[in-house]
Image: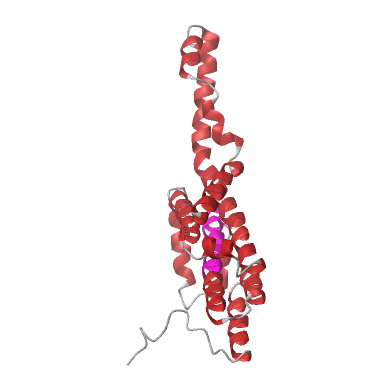
Amino acid sequence: MAPILLLAFLLGTANAFVSPGARAGYLVSPHHSRELVTSSDGRRLCRSIEISSSVARRLTAQDVIESGVSFDTFAPQFLWLLMIAAPSSTLTKRVMGPLQPILALACVHFAIVVTAAAQEGALSQVLIFTEVFDPSLSQLAGMQKLFAYPNFVAEEWPHVLIWDLFVGRAIWLDGLERGINTRLALAFCNFIGPPGLLIHAATCVITKKGLPSMGFGDNVRAD
């Protein structure tokens, strides 16, 4: 129950990141619009409202992207705090034990991807992305071109944050299972990603616990 309650709280906070422009279309009711059309001034005002509403609708996609990025940026920090500050607490186990928190963040990321893919310039990004995997070209230059597109950044940033959290959860679970202190590894995993996994592997070796299997146990080992 605790994971569901936490997710409900986190999803509720997403509304705080929605810009006022996204709500502009709701300020005038249909009833008021019908009254306004009885005069020339009213018709002009209605026309202005229609134009404003059209602009608001065009901004809605960007508002969705902005809100999603904000949510996927800040919501994971509460989960990291639980794993780092209280790794063995009942609350942390109830929240981070199930996969639902990460799935919720992934759903938000998916909404960002779908929304961004429908925007103008998406095809150009795909074409540039193919350059990144062309060995005859500079991969760094290709990525620099992609990062010039805000919607690509909007996809890539939550992408990194969610995968870091996914790996961090795996490190945390391994630490619980084998009695390994994972605080330092988790902190680095949150800040710079893969080095956190290296720190966890080094900690496992130093404490003579062996490298983490990360799910590759006896049930799946090759014969």
Can you give x and y, in whole percent of width and height, for residue 111 in the image?
45, 51
Q: Nearer the viewer, residue 76 or 2?
A: 2
Quadrant in the rendering for residue 19 = top right
Residue 125 appears anywhere in the view: yes
Residue sitting at the far front: 90
Residue sitting at the far top: 39
Magenta segment includes 150 = yes
Residue 191 against residue 205 in the figure, above or below: above
Residue 55 against residue 48 in the figure, above or below: below
- Seen at 46% across and 12% down, the residue is 34
The residue stretch that appears in magenta: 149-166
- Seen at 58% across and 59% down, the residue is 76
Can you give x and y, in whole percent of width and height, for residue 84 in the image?
64, 68
Quadrant in the rendering for residue 221 = bottom left
Residue 143 against residue 202 in the figure, above or below: above
- Seen at 50% across and 14% down, the residue is 32
Q: Is residue 82 left or right of residue 36?
A: right
Magenta segment includes 153 = yes
